[in-house]
Amino acid sequence: MTDVFEYIQFVLAPQMITGLALGVAVVLVAIGLTIIFGLLDVINMAHGEFYAVGAYVALALGTSGVSFWLLLIIVPLIMIPIGYIVERGLIQRVFNMPDRHVTTLLLTFGLGLVVEEALKVVFGPNTQRPATPIPGAIEVMGIILPTYRLFLIAVGFAIVAAVAIVVNKTRLGALVRAAAFDRNMAASLGVPVSLVFAGTFAFGVALAGLAGVLLAPIYSVFPTMGRDFVFLAFTVVIVGGMGSISGAVVAGLLITQVQAISSLIVSPVWSDPIVFSIMVLVLVVRPQGLFGRLGHA
Amino acid sequence: MTAVLEVHDLSVAFGGIRAVDGVSFAAERNAITTIIGPNGAGKSTLFNLVSGLIPPDGGRVVLDGVDRTGEPPHLMQRAGLGRSFQITNLFFELTVFENLRLAAQRLENPMRFLLPVGRSDCALTRVDELIARFSLAEKTSELAGALSHGEQRRLEIAVALAAQPSVLLLDEPTQGMSHADTADTSKLIRGLAKDVTILLIEHDIGVVMDISDRIVVMHQGKKLAEGAPSTVRNDPAVKAAYFGHA
Amino acid sequence: MRDNVTAAPVVDRLALAMRASHVLVAIFVVAGLVFATVGVAMKDTFFLRLATEALIFAGLALSVDILLGYSGLLSLGQALYFGLGAYVAAVVLKEIPSFWVAMGAALVASLVVSILAGLIANRVRGVYFALVTFGLAQVAAKAVYNTRALGASDGMIGVPIVPIDLGVATVMSNSPAGFFLFTLAFIVVLYAISAYLLDTPFGRVLLAIRANERRVPSLGYSTRNARLAAYVLAAVVAALSGALYPMLRGFVSPELLFFTTSGNAVITVVTGGVGTLAGALYGSVILTVLKSVIGSMTEHHLIVIGLLFMVTVIFLPKGLMGFIRPSIERLIGGGSR
């Protein structure tokens, strides 16, 4: 009996908490993806690279002395104009071409390649790791937990809740949802649709950047960090239902737990195939995902 | 006269609303049977049930004496049912010629399915016939998307007719047409009935009374009345529901 | 040359476009023969082998174009079949050093896997199809990556040199010029088979699906069957191309199954021209040349490739072939069906 408790206390619980931290991290990236899809109908293949840019900007500013707490505000503010320019300057150029999904997917895929390679040029190919802003660990019921991971979980949930409130409860969110539901109707009702589109894209990009700041101390910073991470985020978005915020949260937490536990039971090397199999299965059985789509009830 | 298409007690509901509710009728060979009724009466849904686009909740669809209830659209087509759509539904980025050839391809020997299209003689002969009959000779090399609305509506009928169906379902063929085009098209449809059984949905009451052999009136998913144009015109229930006065 | 407008013949644009593609492929073959001649004269090995690799990846791009250009399905996981062909060929060759057995095995394996995977992938369309194909390829890639019997992350080395018995002649897989010419012929045969099939009523049904899938069933065709057939055809083309890879390089590695490989094939097709088939061949050569030329100047050649790709998507949505082919069409053009 004690073996079971010890297993839970020293193996399973820490693993699940680590999984939860990863889950919160993935949800932060996935929410940006899902909002951009829900509103603009755009698969942003460059989303992972925006996450990487956020992490690198934080790293660069951090080493030149800017405090971590300030970075949490500065980096998203830097990302907003970047996202705005990308939406206005690139996405809108192909937005009305036939087959928007494929065209925008290809365009952002190209953008991702360029950004990833640019990061290599500017920062070099090596992995770097910023110092943990909150060192130390807390002991809860005999389980030792790194303080920063707990902080990440708390902050992550707060951000997700804030985003959900903005999208679902505020007047701004109502504008966004109206534009997502029917852009022509929204435009005729006086919603500044193109500003809403660019703004939403920028918002999603800023969230990715913020995730970059938060996750850099745990997962390190390297040029291909976005590519690896965004696959997981895509899985979350698909399983949760493209365009659904609550779907992204539920799927994000669920999938990372599956990953964490399957790493223990099966083997860490098989957790990726398991996760992708879940994605394929969900797509086949329920292509709309677990939850519906933003603005589409 | 014999019935080519029989519909028995056909029903379907969407979220508790009975869109089509126990409708029965028969379409006689080489006659024009027209479905009329106010918007939302369930006419297009009825077409979708008959052509297999929507599986019915109950009832039967019998084509040429064979029960084909619930068969998917491509099998209904092979059984001899052609249809056009209310909202023009063509291959807009392909030429008029290619639209027709695609539709006529079914006539070709299945063994030629993997031979070059240039050798599909039956299909190509059929395309020539259709081009002549629907006066599309000037437009064969144009993209379907570049045609005028009237021409697109004409092509829509030609595509539905291409594979020589025994029953042709036409969903508001004159929708959005000018007066002159409407008159031409109704004459064309009347001419088609020499070779094919036609089931028509039409809003232009002048056209309906002019070309129909039989009229089925629908209202709120149910069949309200059925009969020859003169009978239906004088039916008080029809007047109340459809023409808005008793 | 002026078009003969008075007769107003039926211009079958699709047949004309296909003939123009044939002309472009013929030019491609002539260029390949000239290249081989020069290569042999200069006793070159490096460039001949590089060109052979470009041709092998052209086969993968061809398979992406069969899906994207003809039935409108973007596959982000076509590397699954390329890698399948490569691994099956490598495993077979290490046991039985016979070219035809290896190709036969790759063919059978790709048929089986693509029918099963196609039943899954074809339940969805559009973006979802792209993501399912991506997911399936990821599952396969990670599985290979973790399977010791297949060499895990290191891949498999020591694939033997094989003689390719063609009846009239035998080509050794390590002969730079010989294997280049063989690969050129092989890819052209794959092109010819694909082009032939796409010019039949079956191919036109695929085009109809791309143009307006919802209308196709009322023409009497099952879209599910047609899409599955296209999927299987594309898989076979990718697998047979992939099977040549271990013969050229003597090894296989899990990278062949990774997203980078699938993504490169998509870049190739978009750059060359979607829906032209010939574009896959030209695109692959162009990308290989770009990579080696820019790669010799900077290791960050992906920036240039990525930028070029973005420019293509925005300004040349029909790719290089969309730019060139219309003039070829005018040259041979205007004829009847």
Image: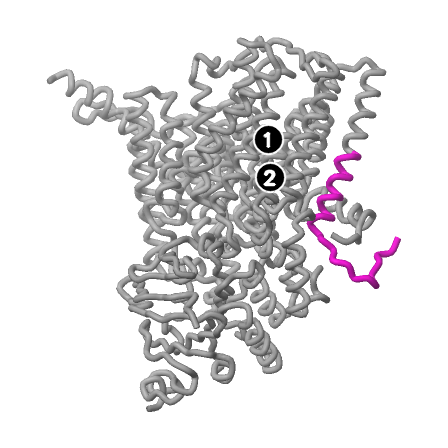
Residue lying furthest front:
B1
Q: Which mark is residue B8?
A: none
- Coordinates of residue C138 in the picture (x, y in percent): 46, 29
Does B215 sit left or right of B95 as displayed?
left
Q: Are marks 2 and 1 in contact (CB under 8 Å)?
A: yes
- Coordinates of residue B179 in the picture (x, y in percent): 59, 82
Indicate the secondary structure of the residue bearing disc 2: helix
Residue nearer the viewer, A271 or A131: A271
Residue type (three-letter) at the residue carrying disc 1: Val
Quadrant housing residue B41: bottom left
Residue lying furthest right:
C1
Does B114 sit left or right of B242 as displayed?
right
Residue type (three-letter) at the residue carrying disc 2: Ile
User: Measuring 74% from the left and 21% from the top, which residue is drawn there?
Assistant: C181
User: Measuring 36% from the left and 34% from the top, which residue is drawn there?
Assistant: A278
Does A156 sit left or right of C37 as displayed?
left
Within the magenta stretch, is there residue C20? yes
Quick check: can you spot residue A199?
Answer: no
Q: Residues within 10 Å of mark 1 (few under 14, many from 20)?
A: many
Name the residue that disc number 1 marks. C237
Query: What colour scheme does the image use?
Result: one colour
- Which residues fall within the magenta stretch? C1-27
Name the residue that disc number 2 marks. C66
| Labels 2 and 1 in the same subunit | yes
Mark 1 belongs to chain: C
Mark 2 belongs to chain: C
Indicate the secondary structure of the residue bearing disc 1: helix
